[in-house]
Amino acid sequence: MTAVRLALPDLAATRALARRLARCLRRGDLVTLEGELGVGKTAFARALIQSLAGAEIEVPSPSFTLVQRYELPGLTVTHADLYRLGAPEDLQELDLEEALEAGAVLVEWPERAGAMLPADRLRLRFSFAPDGGEEARELVIEAGPSWRDRLPALPAERTDAR
């Protein structure tokens, strides 16, 4: 996988990246959002979905429903949160394969799915920035084969991930 590391100094930078990703998203895309609780995975997903909607629509966390589906202009987006998934086999009940055929899928806590998710994805790994303030984050982006041609359009500033 091709990888880049980004500094996101504040929530505005995180939202701006989500808007850039929204412009690159297409049917069949899987984007996984990784990182500990409170690192901004849902805030990123919310900004991306609102960007595609062209409005500040309500985008609740799917923590309890596990899946939220958004019929947006030009693209259906399914937002899944696997934190409460009992076992990787339970993923089949969420119909994410069908969701990928119909549109794009954002998955929080993808590690709960084990090896059940497709390997070709855009993997976003968020972490708290050690010296950047309350809203500062670091992000490592790893791009599968279908993303490599679109990866340069994402970061405003880019450095190689190590």
Image: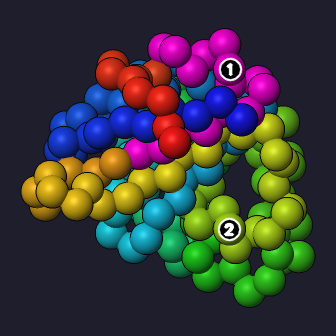
Instruction: Name the residue: 48% across, 30% down.
Output: 160
Q: Position of residue 140 (x, y in %)?
A: 48, 44
Q: Residue furthest front?
A: 162
Instruction: Name the residue: 66% across, 62% down.
Output: 110
Q: Is residue 144 left or right of residue 131?
A: right
| Colour basis | rainbow
Instruction: Name the residue: 14% across, 52% down.
Output: 132
Name above or below for residue 55 compared with residue 41: above
**Earlier sequence position, callout 2 versus callout 1:** 2
Pointer 2: what residue? 111
Q: Residues within 10 Å of mark 1 (few under 14, many from 20)?
A: some
- In the image, the segment drawn in magenta is 139-153
Q: Is residue 122 left or right of residue 134?
A: right
> Closer to the camera, 140 or 56?
140
Name above or below for residue 68 compared with residue 13: below
> Closer to the camera, 122 or 26?
122
Pointer 1: what residue? 148
Instruction: Name the residue: 61% across, 38% down.
Output: 142
Is 149 inside the magenta-drawn segment? yes
Q: Residues within 10 Å of mark 2 (few under 14, many from 20)?
A: some
Q: CA distance from mark 2 to mark 1?
A: 22 Å
The amino acid pointed to by label 2 is: Glu
Quadrant of res 92? bottom right
> Closer to the camera, 59 or 105?
105
Q: Is residue 10 left or right of residue 15?
A: left
Is 100 inside the magenta-drawn segment? no
Residue 115 visible in the shown view: yes
Q: Secondary structure at mark 1?
A: loop
> Closer to the camera, 35 or 18?
35
Name above or below for residue 83 compared with residue 57: below
Q: Position of residue 127 (x, y in %)?
A: 38, 59
Q: Position of residue 119 (x, y in %)?
A: 82, 46
